[in-house]
Image (cartoon, rainbow, N blue to C red):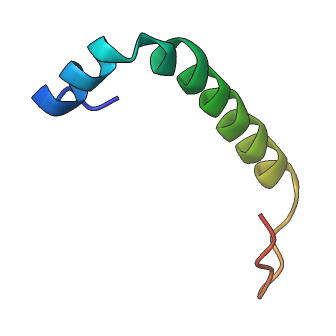
Amino acid sequence: PHPSWRNTAWLRKNPWFEAEVVPYLRERVRDILSVSSAQPRVAGDTEV
Protein backbone atom coordinates (compact mmCIF):
# COMPACT_ATOMS: atom_id res chain seq x y z
CA PRO A 1 0.00 0.00 0.00
CA HIS A 2 0.96 3.59 -0.57
CA PRO A 3 2.73 5.13 2.46
CA SER A 4 0.67 8.32 2.67
CA TRP A 5 -0.42 9.52 6.11
CA ARG A 6 -4.04 8.74 5.31
CA ASN A 7 -3.28 5.18 4.29
CA THR A 8 -0.95 4.63 7.23
CA ALA A 9 -3.58 5.79 9.75
CA TRP A 10 -6.31 3.72 8.09
CA LEU A 11 -4.10 0.61 7.96
CA ARG A 12 -3.29 0.98 11.67
CA LYS A 13 -7.00 1.04 12.48
CA ASN A 14 -7.75 -1.85 10.11
CA PRO A 15 -4.93 -4.41 10.40
CA TRP A 16 -7.19 -7.14 9.00
CA PHE A 17 -6.97 -5.49 5.59
CA GLU A 18 -3.23 -5.98 5.21
CA ALA A 19 -3.36 -9.40 6.90
CA GLU A 20 -6.29 -10.84 4.92
CA VAL A 21 -7.17 -8.79 1.85
CA VAL A 22 -3.75 -7.79 0.52
CA PRO A 23 -2.37 -11.37 0.37
CA TYR A 24 -5.58 -12.53 -1.35
CA LEU A 25 -5.39 -9.73 -3.92
CA ARG A 26 -1.70 -10.41 -4.58
CA GLU A 27 -2.45 -14.08 -5.18
CA ARG A 28 -5.37 -13.30 -7.51
CA VAL A 29 -3.33 -10.80 -9.52
CA ARG A 30 -0.45 -13.29 -9.79
CA ASP A 31 -2.88 -16.00 -10.98
CA ILE A 32 -4.53 -13.72 -13.53
CA LEU A 33 -1.21 -12.49 -14.87
CA SER A 34 0.20 -16.00 -15.16
CA VAL A 35 -2.87 -17.19 -17.08
CA SER A 36 -2.88 -14.08 -19.27
CA SER A 37 0.80 -14.39 -20.12
CA ALA A 38 0.41 -18.10 -20.95
CA GLN A 39 -2.40 -17.51 -23.44
CA PRO A 40 -1.91 -15.63 -26.69
CA ARG A 41 -3.99 -12.46 -26.95
CA VAL A 42 -6.46 -12.15 -29.80
CA ALA A 43 -7.29 -8.75 -31.27
CA GLY A 44 -10.62 -7.58 -29.90
CA ASP A 45 -10.53 -10.07 -27.02
CA THR A 46 -11.94 -8.30 -23.95
CA GLU A 47 -12.05 -11.34 -21.66
CA VAL A 48 -9.90 -11.00 -18.54
- Residue that sits furthest to the right in the current view: 39
- Residue that sits furthest to the front in the current view: 13
Q: In this view, does 31 lie to the left or right of 9?
A: right
Q: Which of 25 and 17 is in front in this view?
A: 17
Q: In which quadrant of the rendered view does residue 5 lie?
A: top left
Q: What is the number of callouts on the image?
A: 0
Q: Quadrant of the N terminus?
A: top left
Q: Nearer the viewer, residue 28 or 11?
A: 11
Seen at 76% across and 78% down, the residue is 46
Task: Please say if 48 is above or below 6.
Answer: below
Q: Is residue 21 left or right of residue 7?
A: right
Task: Please say if 8 is above or below 47.
Answer: above
Q: In which quadrant of the rendered view does residue 33 lie?
A: top right
Seen at 21% across and 21% down, the residue is 8
Q: Nearer the viewer, residue 22 or 37?
A: 22
Q: In this view, does 10 lie to the left or right of 24?
A: left
Seen at 81% across and 71% down, the residue is 47
Q: In this view, does 18 lie to the left or right of 48?
A: left
Q: Which of 24 and 29 is in front in this view?
A: 24
Q: Quadrant of the C terminus?
A: bottom right
- Residue that sits furthest to the left in the current view: 5
Residue 44 in picture, x, y percent from top left: 77, 88
Task: Please say if 47 is above or below 7.
Answer: below
